[in-house]
Amino acid sequence: MVPGQGTAMLLRQAMSGGLRAALLSALGTCAGLLIWAVASAIGLSAVFVASPLAYNALRWVGALYLAFLSIQTLVQLKKRGPSFAVGSQGGRAGFLAFRLGLTTNLLNVKAAVFSVAFIPQFVPYGFPIARGILTLGLVQAVVSFAWAAFLGTSISRVTEMLASEKARRTLTLISAIGFLVLSLSLLFARQGLSSS
C-alpha cells in the first residue's frame, strides 16, 4: 500500500469527518477499484496504457481534481468544524464521503495502469483471464478496505486526541499541501507505473 492520492483523501476524511467518513470514503475507493477491475477485464482500461492522449487526459483531470481538493481543504481552514461531518448530517454527508472516495480513485491514472499492467500478470496460466482479473480486483478491494479501516481508525483516534483548533488547522493545512504536491507530481509524472 503505497501512499498516494487515495491515502491523502482518506487521511483528510478521517481528520475532518471522523471514522465513519473515512470508512465511507474507503468504500467509494473500493468501488472504484472494482470498476477498474471490470474495465480491465473487458479491455477498456488498456486504452489508458496504449494511448498517450487518453492517459494524459485522465492524468490532467486527476491533477485538476487534486488541486480542487487542495483548494477546498484550504477553504475549510476558515470554517470551524469538519467539511464532512457524517455523524451530524446523516445520509447526504455519507454519500458525499463515498463519492469523494470513488471520484478520487476513478481519476487516479495509476489505478487504471495498475489494473492493466500489474493485475493480469497474476492470473494463473489456463485460468479464464476476465474471471481472474475480476477475482484479483475483488481481493485488491478487500485488502485495500482492511488497510483503509485500520488507517482511518488510527487517524480518527489520533485526531480526537489532537482536537484543539490549532492542531486541526495545522493538520488541515498539511492535508491541503499534500493534495497540491500530489497534483503537481501527477502533472509532471512520466507515463507508466515506474513514475512515482
Image (cartoon, helix red, strand yellow):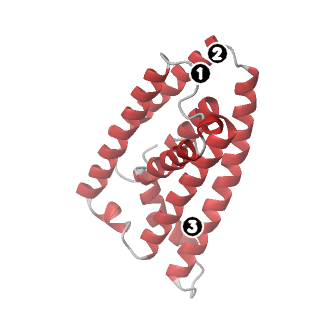
The amino acid marked with disc number 3 is: Gly
Residues under labels 2 and 3: Cα distance?
37 Å
Q: Residues within 10 Å of mark 2 (few under 14, many from 20)?
A: few
Q: Which mark's residue is nearer the viewer, 3 or 1?
A: 1
User: Residue 107: horizontal and vertical position, in percent?
Assistant: 40, 50
Relative horizontal placement of residue 11, taking residue 163 as reference (left or right): left
- Please tell me the numbered disc located at residue 137: 3
Q: What residue do we see at 76% from left, 22% from top?
A: 161
Q: Residues within 10 Å of mark 3 (few under 14, many from 20)?
A: many
Q: Which mark's residue is nearer the viewer, 2 or 3?
A: 2
Give the residue number, with chain letter if any, for mark 2: 167
User: Residue 58: horizontal and vertical position, in percent?
Assistant: 32, 51
Q: Could you say whether the residue bearing mark 1 is in a helix, strand or loop?
A: helix
- Please tell me the numbered disc located at residue 70: none
Disc nearer the start of the sequence (3/1): 3
| 147 or 89, nearer to the observer | 89
The amino acid marked with disc number 2 is: Ala
- Please tell me the numbered disc located at residue 171: 1
Q: What residue do we see at 42% from left, 69% from top?
A: 39
Q: Could you say whether the residue bearing mark 3 is in a helix, strand or loop?
A: helix
- Most extreme residue toward the bottom, as rendered? 126
Q: What residue do we see at 59% from left, 21% from top?
A: 171
User: Residue 193: horizontal and vertical position, in percent?
Assistant: 44, 53
